[in-house]
Image (cartoon, rainbow, N blue to C red):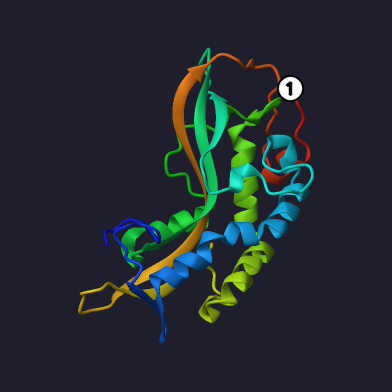
Amino acid sequence: MGDERISLFDPNIGDEDVIAFGDMVYKVAKIRSIFENLLVLTYPQLTTYLNNQEASKFGLANADNSMSDIYSGKYYDFKYLKLGSSDWTKGKLKIYLSVFLYREDSGIREQLKAGCYYPNIFLDDNDAISLKEDCLCKMKPIKAIFNAIASDVNFANIIMQQLAKSIPEFKSSRLFSVGKHCELLRLGSSSWEPIIFGIQFTIDVIEDSPTDDLHTEKIVEDFDSPLDEIRRAVEL
């Protein structure tokens, strides 16, 4: 494994490879199956947090508390307007819990402490985005919502409790902010590789093609405090 993070679902890690948490060893296939539907399993709790932060006005939650397509694990069509641009542009966005492995000396732990992960981010805080029709906002409050959730100890505990049902070693661990020490053994290898196991809310955006079917009149304003800007956000 290189110095940077590598996804648990990376094809270079095989289903038959194993990860050890202390003395307990698990096949990668089992760990993958546990994490595949983690966001779906914890969506009722996530919905509570989203509603508390009035996330529906940003297009991040459905008014009826049903599972939003944004969290389907697939890329979701949206539109954005960068400052200085005269046209809206189509893009694809995916919000998910990324699961990854990294070396102690890679510096990735600092990314965990920073909140969400943005692998391909090209949108600035004041660029406008539209996740749903007639629902426009700046990028800044979108980031703020998930940074707030990821740093919430209670929500992190809910995630850990769900994981601990299948892997007890995850109980009371701090995967969101610190990560968990473990070891990886690949098929054919004669030695264990010390690594750190972490999870992080990830907002991935991909640029697509221009469109001019939106105008720029209704953009939700942002405020200095992440929580205040969510609670008190108003339309310009």
Residue 154 % position (x, y) = 69, 65
Residue occupying the point 56% across, 13% down: 212
Residue occupying the point 54% across, 62% down: 176
Residue 162 % position (x, y) = 62, 70
Instruction: Please give left or right for residue 145 compared with residue 205 in the image.
Output: right
**Quadrant hosting residue 226:** top right
Residue placed farthest to the bottom in the image? 23
Residue 126 % position (x, y) = 58, 28
Depth order, front residue of 89/128: 89
Depth order, front residue of 12/22: 12
Q: Amino acid at mark 1?
A: Leu
Q: Relative to 146, is 79 above or below?
A: above
Q: Relative to 86, is 107 above or below?
A: below
Q: Is residue 179 visible?
A: no
Please give the residue where the numbered disc 1 appears in the rendered image: 236
Residue occupying the point 51% across, 53% down: 114
